[in-house]
Amino acid sequence: MNRRRADTVAGTLVAAVLIVGGALSWQAYQRQQAFDQMGSMMGTSMGAVHGTNPLWYVFGTLLVSAVLGGGYLAVRDDLTSTGANDRSLEEMTDPTDSESAEPSAVATQPTGAINPESQPQARVLDLLPDDERRILEPILSSPGITQIELRDRSDFSKSKVSQTVSALEKRGLLYRERQGRTYRIYPSEDLQQNQAH
């Protein structure tokens, strides 16, 4: 389920709870007013007979809405990220690479085409934006490169290199090790294993 659809469903559910709770609160308020008016005409108090206080309906409505909304927000990333992961896996999978494909299909590939199974790093690099590719290529060719050397090779500013390395690290494509006042940067274990093949 994509995030927009999940947000719409959750928002509609919370809105429905608020509308129903508001209607029940209004009915309880009108009933209380009618009993109070009848009691004032009769000269007695009808407070014990008129039913649930409308404030309890208001409180209950707000509580249920908060629980639904908060519960959704707590699991929102899990619900929507699994769908995004499935989509990104589908996008990364090339239909010509299925096991049912004929072996001759691989042989007839143009010489400039990349076979994702034999060159997974090239496939990863193809999927990255240009600035991230310019950072990751030197790391793949020289594992353990320092962040300062990386800045020199990429011709990016110090902050641009730092931001891009952080973004790639969050996605699990590389990791950093502190060395003095800089970092040594290595490709992730998956990329290193694929390079060895």
Image: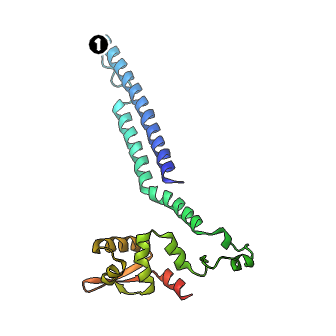
Three-letter amino acid code of the residue under disc 1: Gly
Across and down, in percent, residue 149 comes to: 33, 84
SS assignment at label 1: loop
**Above or below 58: residue 118:** below
Q: Is residue 27 visible?
A: yes
Q: Nearer the viewer, residue 87 or 8?
A: 87
Across and down, in percent, residue 167 comes to: 38, 70
Quarter in which the N terminus is drawn: bottom right
Residue 111 falls left or right of residue 78: right
Across and down, in percent, residue 138 comes to: 41, 82
Across and down, in percent, residue 152 comes to: 32, 81
The residue at the point 65 percent across, 76 percent down is 110
Q: Is residue 75 visible?
A: no
The residue at the point 57 percent across, 65 percent down is 91
Which residue is farthest front?
111
Q: Nearer the viewer, residue 113 or 43?
A: 113
Q: Quadrant of residue 90?
A: bottom right
The residue labelled by disc 1 is: 43
The residue at the point 36 percent across, 86 percent down is 145
**Above or below 71: residue 28:** above
> Number of labelled discs?
1
